[in-house]
Amino acid sequence: MTESDMTTTDVRSYVDARDALAKKTRFVPGFPAEGIVFEDLTPVLADGEAFALLVDALAAKVREWGADMVGGLDARGFLLGSAVAYKLGLGILAIRKKGKLPPPVYTKTYALEYGTAALELPSSGIELGGKKVALIDDVLATGGTLVAASELISELGGEVVGYGVVLEVEGLGARERLQQAPVFVVNVDS
């Protein structure tokens, strides 16, 4: 979608959300390791207006993608994804880290730069067959978590129709790993 395809409200929402991020994000040098600048979204999420602008920007994309459901990744993706789902009248699919749900569960293990991790969904009570799911998270870095969530949803019969995140750590190859659906990053022109 180009800016000419968006409504005036959508364009204003994206621009205002980017401005709010620029003003409210807390930058912490040397965390979690020397040479890294951590971009803390906590002040953005704590500000009602800034939070609403983020949710509006993400919701506009999810609506454009025609999603039936929003998938929020554990844990900050829950906050954003839940708000987007509520705004659009959709359900929220809470994609949990391993060990947070009682069995039986569906599990997808994936590689990290320092080991492995896994995501889980309950094995009953949620029907994903034929559902279009938009995945929401806070930060796009390597893309490993979103890829694992996509594979899990696909294995259960769903289709990921888009990825929405607030921030992107560029240069880690995430977009190349997420080519099956559009990627929207609030703080950049996607």
Image (cartoon, rainbow, N blue to C red):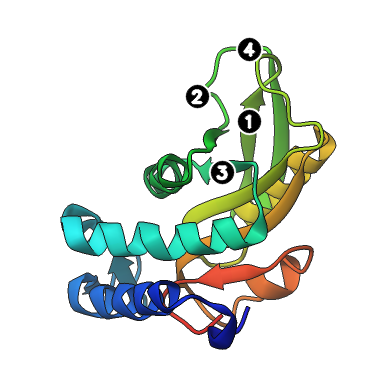
Residue type at mark 2 is Lys
| Quadrant containing the C terminus in the rendered view | bottom right
Mark 3 or mark 1, earlier in chain: 3
Camera-side residue of 111 and 12: 12
Residue occupied by mark 3: 70
Q: CA distance from mark 4 to mark 3?
A: 23 Å
Where in the figure is residue 69, as x and y percent of width and height? 61, 40
Residue 130, picture quadrant: top right
> Who is closer to the viewer here, 143 or 125?
125
For the residues labelled 2 and 4, the Cα–Cα distance comes to: 9 Å
Residue, x 72% and y 24% (percent of image)? Answer: 127
Q: Going from the N terminus, do you reach mark 3 or mark 2 first?
A: 3
Name which of mark 1 and mark 4 comes first in the sequence: 4
Disc 2, SS? loop
* Kind of residue at disc 1: Glu
Q: Nearer the viewer, mark 3 or mark 2?
A: 3
Tell which circle, 4 or 3, labels the residue nearer the N-terminal end.
Answer: 3
* Residue at screen point 60% across, 76% down: 172
Q: Which residue in the structure is indicated by mark 4? A: 103
The residue identified by callout 2 is 100
State which quadrant residue 56 falls in: bottom left
